[in-house]
Amino acid sequence: MYEVYVAARFEAAHRLVGDFGPASRMHGHTYRIEVIVRGEHLGEDGTLYDIGELGEAVKGLAASLDYRNLNEVPDLARANTTAEAVADYCWEKLAPPLRGKGLDSLVVRIWESPDAYAAREETLAS
């Protein structure tokens, strides 16, 4: 199995709904998004996937969330903006152009701090 990894950072605020103690108040994080694509076979050019293209997609997604209130972002506004929900949102944004490219899976990790992340990993069925 081969994998390609890229990462980016963004600053964002949010508040959780429910019994989350202080996290139920508006607060912010320096988020780190890590993205991994995996596959069994390399292309004729010797790559699994163009790392530059993946990097640009991840940087663009991070930029779209930078200095935003995640509770106001369309498609996140209806969710409790947990790290899991942000990982799911990012996975759904990144997956469509990756399908049909010979990749097996996509992993998105959202780090809220250097010590804590949530992730979504799923196959990229065509």
Image: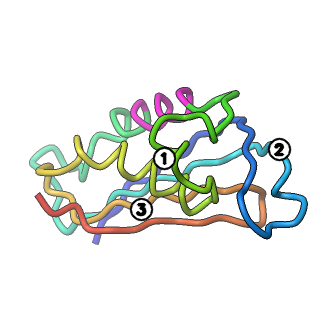
Which residue is drawn at the image coordinates 65% and 48% (left, top)? 32
Proximity of marks 2 and 3: CB atoms separated by less than 8 Å: no
Please, what is the three-letter code of the amino acid marked with disc 1? Val
Give the distance between the C-alpha atoms of the residues marked 2 and 3, in whole angstroms.
28 Å
Q: In front of the other: label 2 or label 1?
A: 2
Residue at the spot of label 3: 107
Q: From the top left corner, tell me how far across and down residue 13 is, in percent.
A: 74, 39
Using residue 4 as the reference point, say whether residue 8 is left or right of it: right
Which residue is drawn at the image coordinates 55% and 52% (left, top)? 86
- 123 or 83, which lies in front? 83
Colour scheme of the rendered structure? rainbow
Q: In front of the other: label 3 or label 1?
A: 3
- 46 or 93, which lies in front? 93
Give neighbour class at mark 2: few <14, some 14-19, many 20+ (Cα, 10 Å). Answer: few
Q: From the top left corner, tell me how far across and down residue 4 is, in percent.
A: 38, 54
Residue at the spot of label 1: 6
Proximity of marks 2 and 1: CB atoms separated by less than 8 Å: no
Using residue 125 as the reference point, say whether residue 34 is left or right of it: right
Give the distance between the C-alpha atoms of the residues marked 2 and 1, in whole angstroms.
29 Å
Q: From the top left corner, tell me how far across and down residue 120 is, in percent.
A: 45, 65
Q: Which mark is residue 26?
A: 2
Which residue is drawn at the image coordinates 40% and 68% (left, top)? 121
Helix, strand or loop at mark 2: loop
Q: Is residue 70 magenta?
A: no
Helix, strand or loop at mark 1: strand
Q: Quadrant of residue 52?
A: top left
Q: Which mark is residue 111?
A: none
Q: Which residues are magenta?
A: 56-64
Q: Quadrant of residue 126?
A: bottom left
- 69 or 64, which lies in front? 69
